[in-house]
Amino acid sequence: MSLDVQALRAEFPILSREVHGKPLVYLDNAATTQKPQAVIDALVDFYSTCNSNVHRGAHYLSDEATRRYEHARTVIAEFIHANAREEVIWTSGTTESINIVAKGMAERLQAGDEVVVTEMEHHANLVTWQQACKHAGAVLRVVPILDNGALDEAAFASTVNSATKFVAMPHVSNALGTVNAVQALIQVVRKQAPNALVLIDGAQGIAHGNVDVQALDCDFYAFSGHKLFGPTGVGVLWGRRSVLEDWPVWLTGGEMIATVSYQDATWGALPNRLEAGTPNIAGAIGIAAAVTWFQQLNVADVQAHEQALLQAAVERGATFEGLKLIGNAPNKIGVYSFNLTGAHPADLGFLLDRQGIAIRTGDHCAQPLMDRLGVPGTARASFSIYNTLDEVELLFRGLEKARDMLA
Amino acid sequence: MKLPTTSEIIDDIEFLDDWESRYQYIIDLGKALPPLTEQERVPEAKVKGCQSDVWMHAEKAGEQLRFRVDSDAVIVRGLLALVMAAYNEKSPGDILAFDVDQYFLTLDLERHISPTRGNGLRAIVGKIRELAAAA
């Protein structure tokens, strides 16, 4: 069985629109994915039929909204193979998820403790840890990458030691597409730093299938709804129950308390203790709809299709004069980052846009990584399940035109 | 290629009827804009754009203000050339009187100067007007 891409495309209304009078070729999926009708319908249906605040229980609509909202939590828990649904904390997205963990660690780190990250971090998984270390007087250690964009696993093993209290790394690099061998790397941490906690930034990893937090043996896994065909403004922090149970609360207010007096308060149980205030109810229902939709697809087909798109781009690009692929690690998702001799990425992005082709250009929120690679930025085409081989070809025809215009 | 005046630019661009020839014109303007030296591309002269860097040096030349600008992206350089046609070696009064939004609207390039675009062009215009107001 292979993916029926045309049938899949028909489920995404936005893919049939035009930009600048040209059919949209959407290759900016690492920034955000488009939404299938099933997700759009779930949002409209929630607001049309059962909008109400949750956990108040005073009336019919509130009960129904609460049921749908808590069912969404169960859907996510099953999707990532959590031990328990209480381990799924709703957040506004990956950035907030990581901040909850980093701010908690900032309170726990001691001077001289070490936090390990990698050279390929998105700012969300770098600035957070850098600031936590500054706050605590801890040391931030950065594991280098190889020139091909793969993590230097030997360096990782020699960096993690008994002083390591936390390891934060991406499942998949947003700028390069490198898939890290997170499961094996976590085993290294367990052996060499048994007291360290591990967070996986899953922003780019989650939409490519098969995330199993128990098999990974991580302590935290963070991701966003909008990179997984769901709405913006909602995300997940999964945490191991034993770790989350006494995790420092980061936002205080309604919903998260057990008892309150004028002078004191006690915190509620998981998951509410880390979810102050009215949550993004529609967002949670939307992300669950996205997951339910995504789970209908065969993961092997999804991955094979993405690899076929990447392979086509790599092959076409190899003979494209002046094009340099940035990041060719052996294990990659469909992220094609590149530079073209004599052309600034912003110029390429602009001239492709005029042809209806949406890519991202710039530093991809990974300035230190761009410095490490010795480039000011890259042009990045990122593929998703609904992209076609024809669109890969259109990207290169668009680049030919851009190159001719800039020559 | 000598850098044209605003009215020459308006005439030229209105004559071109498809996006390719219009942007080819802007790219050619960008190539004709005299570049800054590496030494002049200092952080103090940098105007933050999101996707490309922009630099500007300003000085008084008698009653006029003289600007030299550069970017690492050629389309932005071309757009800067359009801005220079409007502002370079003009009096502060002329600078403040010039309706830059109308100018870009006439050129059908208004989206480049909109506040939502991170190419530094809006910031350059703001800085030029600030300098003119202070002169």
Image: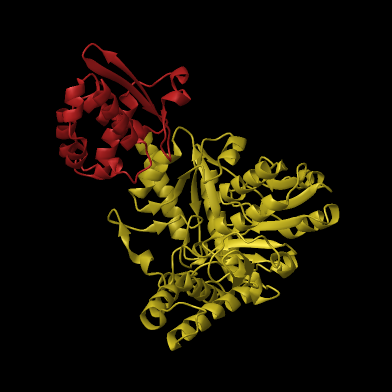
Chain colours: A yellow, B red
Q: Nearer the viewer, residue A264 or A173?
A: A264
Q: Residue at x 50, y 80 (%)?
A: A56
A244 displayed left or right of B131:
right
B60 displayed left or right of B55:
left
Rendered position, A307 above or below A267: above
Residue A215 lies in what quarter of the image?
Answer: bottom right
Residue B135 lies in what quarter of the image?
Answer: top left
Rendered position, B76 above or below A238: above
Q: Position of residue A200 (x, y in %)?
A: 66, 58
Q: Position of residue B80 (x, y in %)?
A: 31, 30
Q: Position of residue B133 (x, y in %)?
A: 24, 26
A350 displayed left or right of A296:
left
Residue B18 lies in what quarter of the image?
Answer: top left
Rendered position, A344 above or below A246: above
Q: Position of residue B100 (x, y in %)?
A: 21, 35
B77 displayed left or right of A243:
left
Task: Find the residue positioned furthest to the bottom.
Answer: A60
Q: Residue at x 40, y 34 (%)?
A: B73
Which quadrant holds the C terminus of chain A? top left
Q: Nearer the viewer, residue A5 or A397?
A: A5
Rendered position, A18 above or below B76: below
Q: Residue at x 59, y 45 (%)?
A: A127
